[in-house]
Image: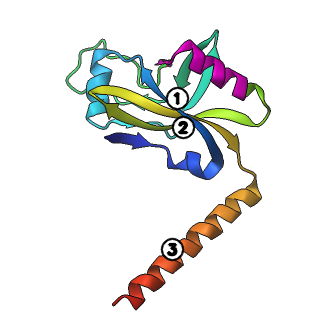
């Protein structure tokens, strides 16, 4: 079940390899995420000392929590195998590649993040994808009208 997704990532990047990672969360954060109070629109991922972290991810503090609720935009560690981290690190060394979060979802009761190695799009690529989307929308509209 997808809780939050990052539509802008598909517009700004060419998505290549995808990985599923767990997130290191505190108890009240898990409740907030399951309630849907999470946003990954401005978030990004960094590899520091062979560990992967997500930064800028917003989880609204749990309303029934105590004064010890964690910060809304704290840095959270992502849980990946060393092999996966090594693969990510090798890809990111190449100029133009980055790691972006695609969505936050539940998998067997656990909160997971789908991340991807992506290459940035140029402005003309973005214009091309907008034109393609408009064309598909027009085709669907024509099919819908002619189907009646």
Query: How much space separates mark 2 and mark 3, taking CA atoms?
Result: 28 Å
| Residue designated by label 3 | 137
Q: Position of residue 53 (x, y in %)?
A: 54, 20
Which quarter of the picture shows residue 64?
top left
Magenta segment, which residues?
A: 75-91
SS label for mark 2: loop
Residue extending farthest to the right is 95
The residue carrying pointer 2 sits among few (fewer than 14), some (14 to 19) or many (20 or more) residues within 10 Å by Cα, namely few
| Residue designated by label 2 | 42
**Closer to viewer: mark 3 or mark 1:** 3
Q: Which mark is residue 39?
A: none
- Does residue 90 show up magenta in the picture? yes
Question: Which residue appears at 28% of the width and 20% of the height?
Answer: 28
Which quarter of the picture shows residue 89?
top right
Tell whether 108 sits left or right of 103.
left
Q: Position of residue 69 (x, y in %)?
A: 32, 16
Task: Please tell me which of labels 3 and 1 falls first in the chain.
Answer: 1
Given contact means CB atoms under 8 Å apart, are the residues at marks 1 and 2 in contact? yes
**Closer to viewer: mark 2 or mark 3:** 3
SS label for mark 1: loop
Task: Please tell me which of labels 1 and 2 falls first in the chain.
Answer: 2
Which quarter of the picture shows residue 3?
top left
């Amino acid at each position: 079940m997808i809780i939050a997704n990052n539509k802008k990532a598909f517009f700004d990047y060419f998505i290549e390899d995808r990985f599923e990672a767990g997130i290191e969360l505190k108890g009240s954060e898990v409740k907030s995420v399951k309630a849907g109070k999470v946003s990954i629109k401005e978030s990004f991922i960094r590899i520091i000392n062979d560990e992967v972290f997500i930064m800028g991810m917003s989880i609204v503090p749990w309303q029934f929590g105590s004064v010890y609720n964690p910060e809304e935009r704290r840095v959270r560690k992502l849980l990946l195998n060393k092999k996966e981290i090594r693969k990510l690190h090798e890809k990111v060394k190449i100029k133009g590649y980055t790691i972006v979060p695609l969505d936050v979802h539940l998998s067997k009761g656990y909160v997971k993040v789908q991340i991807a190695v992506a290459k940035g799009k140029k402005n003309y690529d973005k214009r091309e994808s907008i034109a393609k989307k408009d064309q598909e929308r027009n085709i669907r509209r024509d099919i819908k009208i002619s189907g009646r």
